[in-house]
Image (cartoon, rainbow, N blue to C red):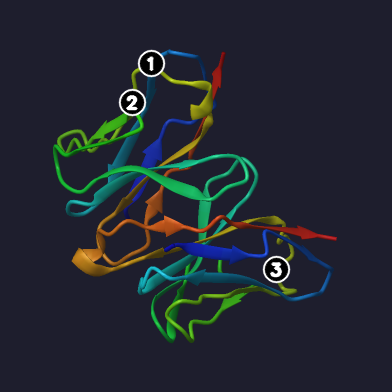
């Protein structure tokens, strides 16, 4: 079946450092890909998405590019802030089926 | 204001008691989902419904039950058969149009604690 694998954390960075969180997927066909963010005690919020190969999703300084050749959707941000501290989930969906989530990556940014 | 509401924010369950978590959406979405999240863990799918009066078991349905009598509502009952119910419960909804590629939105969650 479909699956999503993302790098396990926790990831700890200093403010203004560069962030990469790796995400790869396995799926039949061409799924849509998502990154969600979860702040402590809250639900998941959509951060960005991409629906076809070579699409780049972006929001709040975060970016991810849909790479069909490497089946990847890595999340990047050039300069993280303390307020970016959260858990990040990569997810894929390929039809009228439930989203498939990665296990989440906890990011801590220290001043 | 469109969105998903879950209530209550915190819920306490006594041993042997059934409790029901509410989930309501006004996004006109056909599909709704319930997930369980344990501390420091990812999401596990409990039940989902793609249309009114129909629902399917997810990966961890044992000890839970649902109903989908109205499009906007998808309540989850945690039964006494669920021996370890303490967790954070998240409801979500999605429109299955365009081959299911629509974005899935989440509610704020309900934290269930056992007394």
Pick the front one: A50 or B61: A50
Q: CA distance from mark 3 to mark 1?
A: 43 Å
Do the residues under discs 2 and 3 have CB atoms within 8 angstroms? no
Q: CA distance from mark 2 to mark 3?
A: 39 Å
Q: Secondary structure at mark 3?
A: loop
Residue located 38% across and 71% down the image: B31
Pick the front one: A103 or B104: B104
In terms of image quadrants, where is residue A25?
top left
| Residue A47 relative to residue A109: left or right | left
Q: Secondary structure at mark 2?
A: strand
Q: Chain of mark 2?
A: A
Label 3, on which residue? Answer: B82
Q: Does residue B59 appear in this view?
A: no
Front tag of 2 and 3: 2
Q: Secondary structure at mark 1?
A: loop
Q: Chain of mark 3?
A: B
Q: Position of residue A3 (x, y in %)?
A: 35, 48
Residue located 23% across and 68% down the image: B97
- Report the disc number at residue A72: none
Of marks 1 and 2, which one's residue comes earlier in the chain?
Answer: 1
Q: Position of residue A74 (x, y in %)?
A: 31, 31
Q: Is A14 rendered above or below residue B98?
A: above
Q: CA distance from mark 1 to mark 2?
A: 7 Å
Q: Is B18 rendered above or below residue A14?
A: below
Do the residues under discs 1 and 2 have CB atoms within 8 angstroms? yes
Label 2, on which residue? Answer: A76
| Residue A76 relative to residue B115: left or right | left
- Report the disc number at residue A18: 1
Q: Is A102 rendered above or below residue A80?
A: below
């Amino acid at each position: 079946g479909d699956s999503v694998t993302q790098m396990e954390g926790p990831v700890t960075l200093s403010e203004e450092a560069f962030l990469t969180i790796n995400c790869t997927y396995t799926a039949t066909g061409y799924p849509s890909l998502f990154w969600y963010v979860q702040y402590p005690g809250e639900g998941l919020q959509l951060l960005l998405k991409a629906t076809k190969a070579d699409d780049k999703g972006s929001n709040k300084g975060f970016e991810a590019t849909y790479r069909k050749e490497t089946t990847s959707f890595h999340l990047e941000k050039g300069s993280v802030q303390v307020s970016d501290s959260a858990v990040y989930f990569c997810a894929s969906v390929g039809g009228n089926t439930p989203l498939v989530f990665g296990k989440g990556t906890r990011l801590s940014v220290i001043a | 204001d469109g969105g998903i509401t879950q209530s209550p924010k915190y819920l306490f369950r006594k041993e042997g008691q059934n409790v029901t978590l509410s989930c309501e959406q006004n996004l006109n979405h056909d599909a709704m989902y319930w997930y369980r999240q344990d501390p420091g863990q990812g999401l596990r799918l409990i039940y989902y419904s793609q249309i009114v009066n129909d629902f399917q078991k997810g990966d961890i349905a044992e000890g839970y039950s649902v109903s989908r009598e109205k499009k906007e509502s998808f309540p989850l009952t945690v039964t006494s058969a669920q021996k370890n119910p303490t967790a954070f419960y998240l409801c979500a909804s999605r429109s299955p149009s365009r081959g299911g590629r629509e974005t899935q939105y989440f509610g704020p969650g309900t934290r269930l604690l056992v007394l």
